[in-house]
């Protein structure tokens, strides 16, 4: 069972109210009723994403804002569905909440937009191939569609340029549609296939842009790399040392991912997000997920690793900088990626401190490495280079995992591999987490495998109540974001108060003006100062209490 699903079930305490199956109309008393039936399930992560959008919509107007009564009824119904793991119902309710909060009336348009998914049959195709775009409904209504809807598709260069418009499609019923996208006269390169669902007035109800790469050389390089991987397997190259094994598994990860991209629409969480969710999240902070398919970076790295191995060299011995490695997992996919940074000054003759960095909600192994202004260097890597730290970023097994269950295993697997391949000081392994990763970091301190020198959590959002009464005696720094649209300042402080009671070496502070999107870069100088002081044996808690009113210092009921 997914970690996210287990966490939600662990927190459930309401039973789902009986759902009346009736047609959705403009009358508010119909907005908590459902009709039709699902052909496939909504991902729990998508329901959680919609929930966070609702929280952000409510809180962006300030603490004095009170949603209309109809929205409050919907929120209660949606929360109960979510807490009982009824993610299909929860997603539909949260979408209706957003519509009401934004002054729209839920109706058939929202059901149609929530039903129609849009995807390509692959991410990479040879020039001249027929690529298929597919519309498929997740939900079927138990009646004919009453209004008029249309779909517009276009194909445009990803870097900008003239778009090729396809003839519009009329949507008269919710059914599978297969659209052929000829590429015979297109030059090689990266493209975006844009989708928009419109109502009869021309209003966009949902939209998406799916990436497509046309490249003959991609297939040639991939076939050559697969042949090298077969040679390495026959030679038993992975058995020579942990670094050899890491290199071989990274090559196999790259070939598996690239080959899969020729058969599936490989992409990040946001690149493959449901069109309605993309439309509803317009204006939300920039996506925190990064493209998993990076042929311009990962293929050259894998080719260089394979070349070194075939020559009998240690492929990782002299490599520093930003690396994307992988290990054989088998939990949810064959290979699990993780990012590594080694400063140019790295040399294995001495022991080095390691920071394990945990990403945010819908992020991945590249989030904390790659998401920075164009042309700029990641502040995390810049500070690591200047202060002499190794950095490792686990992928975390998908969105909203909170680094629990098998996602916690991922963290410790990455630590084990870093210690096996590099000169890591086992007494100086530090943990830093952002948003979901901040809460994940605090949860991981309770894991019996944990041996962290110190932990820094930024904009941490609690998802469940853990017992920190037996927390380890390690330094902990919690830096919260008072302008967060995910949780209130009071909720942030209450969480800090709970941690302060469990951790004896604990400090709490807030980052003025920080929200959930910019808190981590704002916090990083403080985080590195904290880790430096712990390494030097010079850090002591400030002794300042968490600024929580006395009457609220009792932890919330379980």
Image (cartoon, rainbow, N blue to C red):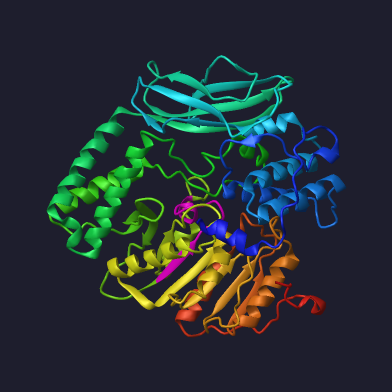
Residue 337 in the figure: left or right of residue 45: left
In front here: 192 or 74? 74
Position of residue 475 measured from the top left corner of the image (x, y, whole percent): 54, 80
Q: Nearer the viewer, residue 524 or 170?
A: 170
The quadrant of the rendering that contains the C terminus is bottom right
Question: Image point 52% across, 59% down: which residue?
Answer: 3
For residue 366: magenta?
Answer: yes
Magenta segment range?
354-370
Number of disc labels = 0
- Decide: is 56 above or below 107: below
Q: Is 42 on the left-hand or right-hand side of 294?
A: right
Q: Is residue 270 visible?
A: yes
Residue 365: image quadrant is: bottom left
**Quarter holding residue 544:** bottom right
Residue 265: image x %, image y %?
44, 35
Q: Position of residue 105 (x, y in %)?
A: 80, 34
Which residue is pictured at 58% across the width and 24% down the height? Answer: 175
Assess whether residue 236 is covered by the magenta stretch. Answer: no
Residue closer to the observer: 398 or 293: 398
Asked whether residue 524 appears in the rendered view, the answer is no
Image spot of residue 358 (x, y percent):
50, 62
Which residue shows up at 56% across the image and 56% down it? 5
Vertical side of 335 occupied by 218: above or below: above
Residue appearing at x 30%, y 68% in the figure: 422
Q: Is residue 392 left or right of residue 521?
A: left
Foreground of the two, 387 or 302: 302
């Amino acid at each position: 069972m997914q970690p996210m699903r287990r966490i939600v079930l662990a927190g459930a305490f309401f039973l789902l109210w009986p759902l009346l199956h009736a047609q959705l109309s403009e009358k508010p008393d119909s907005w908590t009723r459902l009709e039709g039936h699902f052909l496939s399930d909504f991902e729990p992560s998508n329901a959680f994403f919609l929930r966070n959008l609702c929280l952000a919509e409510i809180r962006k107007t300030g603490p004095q804002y009170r949603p209309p009564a109809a929205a409050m009824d919907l929120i209660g119904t949606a929360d109960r569905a979510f807490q009982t793991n009824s993610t299909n119902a929860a997603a539909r309710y949260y979408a209706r909440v957003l519509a009401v909060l934004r002054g729209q009336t839920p109706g058939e348009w929202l059901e149609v937009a929530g039903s129609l998914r849009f995807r390509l049959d692959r991410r990479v195709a040879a020039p001249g191939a027929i690529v298929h775009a597919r519309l498929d409904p997740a939900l079927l209504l138990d009646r004919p569609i009453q209004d008029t809807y249309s779909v517009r598709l276009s194909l445009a260069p990803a870097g900008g340029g003239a778009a090729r418009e396809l003839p519009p499609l009329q949507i008269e019923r919710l059914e599978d549609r297969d659209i052929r996208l000829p590429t015979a006269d297109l030059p090689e390169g990266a493209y975006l296939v844009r989708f928009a669902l419109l109502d009869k007035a021309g209003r966009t109800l949902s939209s998406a842009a799916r990436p497509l790469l046309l490249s003959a050389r991609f297939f040639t390089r991939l076939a050559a790399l697969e042949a090298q991987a077969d040679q390495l397997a026959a030679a038993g190259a992975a058995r020579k040392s942990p670094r050899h094994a890491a290199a071989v598994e990274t090559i196999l990860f790259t070939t598996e991912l690239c080959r899969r991209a020729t058969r599936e629409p490989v992409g990040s969480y946001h690149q493959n997000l449901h069109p309605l969710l993309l439309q509803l999240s317009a204006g939300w902070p920039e996506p925190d997920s990064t493209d998993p398919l990076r042929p311009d970076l990962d293929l050259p790295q894998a080719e260089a690793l394979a070349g070194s191995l075939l020559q009998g060299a240690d492929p990782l011995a002299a490599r520093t900088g930003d690396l994307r490695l992988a290990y054989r997992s088998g939990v949810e996919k064959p290979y699990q990626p993780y990012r590594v940074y080694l400063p140019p000054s790295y040399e294995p003759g001495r022991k080095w401190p390691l920071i394990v960095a945990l990403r945010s909600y819908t992020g991945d192994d590249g989030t904390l490495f790659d998401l920075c202004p164009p042309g700029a260097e990641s502040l995390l890597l810049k500070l690591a280079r200047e202060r002499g730290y190794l950095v490792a970023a686990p992928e975390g097994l998908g969105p909203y995992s909170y680094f629990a269950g098998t996602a916690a295993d991922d963290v410790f697997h990455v630590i084990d591999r870093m210690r096996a391949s590099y000169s890591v000081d086992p007494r100086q392994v530090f943990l830093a987490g952002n948003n979901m990763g901040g809460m994940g970091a605090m949860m991981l301190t309770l894991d019996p495998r944990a041996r962290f020198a110190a932990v820094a959590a930024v904009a941490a959002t609690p998802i469940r109540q853990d017992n920190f009464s037996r927390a380890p005696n390690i330094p902990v720094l919690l830096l919260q974001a008072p302008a967060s649209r995910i949780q209130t300042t009071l909720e942030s402080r209450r969480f800090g108060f709970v941690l302060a009671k469990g951790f004896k070496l604990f400090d709490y502070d807030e980052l003025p003006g920080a929200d959930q999107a910019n808190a981590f870069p704002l916090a990083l100088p403080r985080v590195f100062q904290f880790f430096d002081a712990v390494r030097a044996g010079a850090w002591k808690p400030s002794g300042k209490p968490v600024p929580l009113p006395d009457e609220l210092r009792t932890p919330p009921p379980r």
